[in-house]
Image: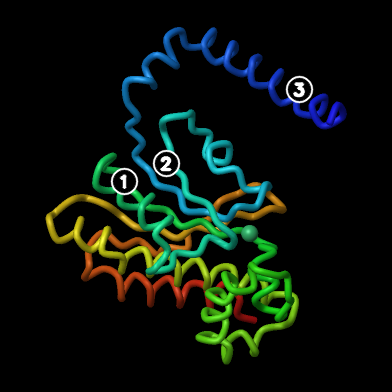
């Protein structure tokens, strides 16, 4: 226990320093945040520790609403994700919902290679559904490209799922501005790329999906 407490003490020390630096850099920062948060963006990303949402886009507390799970999956029956989406869209009025995958995603590797990892197998089934949907095209790719190709396909499918949620559909029906995007993050270079799935209305979803899918296939062709 002593060892553990000692290890965690570093985190608490880091926190004290971070809070002091933040307040020194912008006096009143925390008391302003206490009153309200007004994020413009909802980030739906992977739980992977190498993909920390706020840091990648250099946003401060209060500026990004975040939901993360294994392999950035948006499932229609996942009340956790849907509740986050509903609060973000209905209450906070975020203008953008961004589904973000990342290269070398362990969940996607497991889905592609039928690796058994335990309970999470059942969650990763959702990514396997994506794989099966696109299996014929994936089979045409060299082995080395398949993981990143499935990462991108998974972003497109999950972003499309986000578009189909009642939360986003209802927002669009009442004329609220909310745009759904699909991005992918490169662990090797720290860069985010827009997969050009950009849907701002119910009518946008299918054309945006098809355009983005063609883009992903072109990226991996040859
Ligand atoms: Zn991941």
Position of the N terminus, as image quadrant, is top right
Relative to 117, say whether 47 is above or below. above
Q: Is residue 24 left or right of residue 83?
A: right
Q: Secondary structure at mark 3?
A: helix
Relative to 164, say whether 35 is above or below. above
- Mark number for residue 65? 2
Front residue (pair 191, 16) = 16
Residue 67 pos. (x, y %)? 47, 49
- Dot 1 or dot 2: first in sequence order is 2
Q: Quadrant of residue 37?
A: top left
Residue 3 pos. (x, y %)? 87, 29
Separation of disc 3 and disc 2 at Cα?
27 Å
- Mark number for residue 87? 1
Residue 162 pos. (x, y %)? 37, 63
Q: Is residue 116 left or right of residue 89?
A: right
Name the outermost residue toward the right.
3
- Mark number for residue 104? none
How many residues crowd around disc 3 within 10 Å: few (fewer than 14), some, or many (20 or more)? Answer: few
Name the outermost residue toward the bottom.
136
Q: Secondary structure at mark 1?
A: helix
Name the outermost residue toward the front.
1
* Residue denoted by label 3: 9
- Pointer 1 and pointer 2: residues touching (CB < 8 Å)? yes
Front residue (pair 187, 3) = 3
Relative to 154, say whether 99 is above or below. above
Instruction: Look at the numbered disc 2 and say if its residue's Cβ is closer than 8 Å to ligand 1.
Output: no
């Amino acid at each position: 226990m002593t060892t553990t407490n000692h290890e965690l003490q570093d985190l608490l020390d880091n926190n004290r320093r971070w809070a002091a630096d933040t307040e020194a850099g912008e006096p009143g920062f925390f008391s302003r945040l206490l009153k309200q948060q007004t994020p413009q963006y909802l980030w739906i990303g992977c739980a992977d520790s190498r993909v920390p949402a706020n840091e990648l886009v250099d946003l401060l507390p209060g500026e990004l609403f975040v939901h993360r799970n294994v392999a950035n999956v948006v499932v229609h029956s996942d009340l956790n994700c849907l509740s986050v989406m509903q609060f973000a869209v209905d209450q906070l009025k975020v203008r953008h919902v961004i589904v973000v995958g990342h290269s070398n995603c362990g969940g996607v590797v497991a889905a592609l290679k039928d690796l058994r990892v335990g309970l999470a197998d059942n969650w990763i089934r959702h990514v396997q559904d994506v794989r099966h949907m696109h299996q014929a095209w994936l089979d045409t790719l060299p082995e080395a490209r398949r993981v990143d190709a499935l990462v991108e396909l998974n972003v497109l499918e999950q972003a499309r799922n986000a578009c189909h949620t009642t939360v986003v559909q209802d927002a669009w029906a009442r004329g609220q501005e909310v745009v759904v995007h699909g991005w992918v993050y490169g662990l090797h270079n720290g860069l985010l790329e827009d997969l050009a799935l950009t849907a701002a209305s119910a009518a946008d979803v299918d054309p945006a999906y098809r355009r983005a899918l063609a883009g992903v296939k072109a990226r991996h062709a040859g």
